[in-house]
Image (cartoon, rainbow, N blue to C red):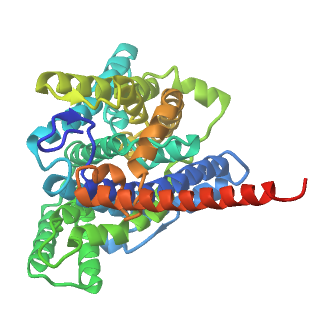
């Protein structure tokens, strides 16, 4: 990605940004593996004799009816646990806007245009397929999202060490995707609105914002308030995950004097493992349980709605992200990083076609009146994501040796000061440290040479 003062597309990140991206993606990678395990477990449970038990657990309802919270386990996972995921997404977006890659409009143009095109193209592909086959347009938003955790899990499985710039580009795409996804959910999947509940939710958000500005601390203050805000948002008819994003966006993500990390970063550091390691996998466990048989898989490729989802993820996402990146670079005159090629952008674009978590959520919301079609769309999301993962893996493996060299160069720390050498090449102290290290090694080799020479002389003076 371009950085301020540097018109290189996918150029080197600043050191603080690199460290933040590395830490965030490390957690998401672990969460992605758990996500894969949860999805596989859901499929196994549904397609074995345990299927009835699985369905009974998923459909079991509990909670206070008077508060509109008598929900099934699956609904609690969808509306409750995913609010934690979107809370983290809100913090990520806020940080990107004030301290990350999106803070500078010129630098933000490339990833934002790529992300927007990467959402528009899949929606267009879906619409074309659905219209040509006489299907429903209700699922147009299903293939628009990118699942960063699933994508990182694929990278971990195939053993590809992407350079930091490509990983950051993928993360920024996912952050922008999440923003537009929550807007789509709020605008297109909100029907009847309870004005009183919505107003009370806004009052709670105002109190939340006021407490933050007053510097009030303590989880015991914010957690109960967050639950109340979420409950009123849920009762209003607006999807409850909107409350999570709103609260995440309110956190301060800039560092003040005397602070090592901003409050937003500290809270994200605490909540991200809960989101990636618990909330999202549990949602997947109850959302990915669909019947998979030979006939069901064949139906995915014959029905216009499900075929539109598959083609939207595999083809639409790739064309959208790659085409948007190329057009943005072309018209902003930003040059691609010399160490990378457009083939690398194509590989990441295809990886963005993995649209698991949010795609499953939108699929459920889009076809609430047709449970059978909703399950078929879920199957299409699974199949499309797997196909996108396979396609991306092939492209990434073709460039894997190049990635390994770039990754090793980015991680090299020969002076062992905790900072990669590539960020210190313009600092005199670094070169003085390296000179001292090499002088010490040279002195050691001279000592060893003298010892070896003395040993040879001793051997030569011995008896024949």
Q: Which residue is drawn at 34% across and 41% down?
A: 170
The residue most toward the top is 132
The residue most toward the right is 464
Question: Looking at the rendering, in which quadrant would you find the N terminus?
Answer: top left
Q: Where is residue 36 in the image (x, y as percent from the top left)?
A: 55, 49
The image shows residue 309, relative to residue 19, as above or below, that is above
Q: Position of residue 373 (x, y in %)?
A: 47, 35
Q: Position of residue 339 (x, y in %)?
A: 34, 32
Q: Which residue is drawn at 43% across and 27% down?
A: 314
Left or right, 463 with reference to 334:
right
The image shows residue 13, relative to residue 91, as above or below, that is above
Left or right, 136 with reference to 6:
right
Displayed quadrant of residue 123:
top left
Depth order, front residue of 455/335: 455
Q: Which residue is drawn at 44% across and 62% down?
A: 279
Q: Residue at x 32, y 42 (%)?
A: 165
Mark count? 0
Depth order, front residue of 59/415: 415
Left or right, 401 with reference to 76:
right
Residue 302 in view here: yes
Residue 89 in view here: no
Depth order, front residue of 219/83: 219
Displayed quadrant of residue 137:
top left
Q: Position of residue 177 (x, y in %)?
A: 28, 43
């Amino acid at each position: 990605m371009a950085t301020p003062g540097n018109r290189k597309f996918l150029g080197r990140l600043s050191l603080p940004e690199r460290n933040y991206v590395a830490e965030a993606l490390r957690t998401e990678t672990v969460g992605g593996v758990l996500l894969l395990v949860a999805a596989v477990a859901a499929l196994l449970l549904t397609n074995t004799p345990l299927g009835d038990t699985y369905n009974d657990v998923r459909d079991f309802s509990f909670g206070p009816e008077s508060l509109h919270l008598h929900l099934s386990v699956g609904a609690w996972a969808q509306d409750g646990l995913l609010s934690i995921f979107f809370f983290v997404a809100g913090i990520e977006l806020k940080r990107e806007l004030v301290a990350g890659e999106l803070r500078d409009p010129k630098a933000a143009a490339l990833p934002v245009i790529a992300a927007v095109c990467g959402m528009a193209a899949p929606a267009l592909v879906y619409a074309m397929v659905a219209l040509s086959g006489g299907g429903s347009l209700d699922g147009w938003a299903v293939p628009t999202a990118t699942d960063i955790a699933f994508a990182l899990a694929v990278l971990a499985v195939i053993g590809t060490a992407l350079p930091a710039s490509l990983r950051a580009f993928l993360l920024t795409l996912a952050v922008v995707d999440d923003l537009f996804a929550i807007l789509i959910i709020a605008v297109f999947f909100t029907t009847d609105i309870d004005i009183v509940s919505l107003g009370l939710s806004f009052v709670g958000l105002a109190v939340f914002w006021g407490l933050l500005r007053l510097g009030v601390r303590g989880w015991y203050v914010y957690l109960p308030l967050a639950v109340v805000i979420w409950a009123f948002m849920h009762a209003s008819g607006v999807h409850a995950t909107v409350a999570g994003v709103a609260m995440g966006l309110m956190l301060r993500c800039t560092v003040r004097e005397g602070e090592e990390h901003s409050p937003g970063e500290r809270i994200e550091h605490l909540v991200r493992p809960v989101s990636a390691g618990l909330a999202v996998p549990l949602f997947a466990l109850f959302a990915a349980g669909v019947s998979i048989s030979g006939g069901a898989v064949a139906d995915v490729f014959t029905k216009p709605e499900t075929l539109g989802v598959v083609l939207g993820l595999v083809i639409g996402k790739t064309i959208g992200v790659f085409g948007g990146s190329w057009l943005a670079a072309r018209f902003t005159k930003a040059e691609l990083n010399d160490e990378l090629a457009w083939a690398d952008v194509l590989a990441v674009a295809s990886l963005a076609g993995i649209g698991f978590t949010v795609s499953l959520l939108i699929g459920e919301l889009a076809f609430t009146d047709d449970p059978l079609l909703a399950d078929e769309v879920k199957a299409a999301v699974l199949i499309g994501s797997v196909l996108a993962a396979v396609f991306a893996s092939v492209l990434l493996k073709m460039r894997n040796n190049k990635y390994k060299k770039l990754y090793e160069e980015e991680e090299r720390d020969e002076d062992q000061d905790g900072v990669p050498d590539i960020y210190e090449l313009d600092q005199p102290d670094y070169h003085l440290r390296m000179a001292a290290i090499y002088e010490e090694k040279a002195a050691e080799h001279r000592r060893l040479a003298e010892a070896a020479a003395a040993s040879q002389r001793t051997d030569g003076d011995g008896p024949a």
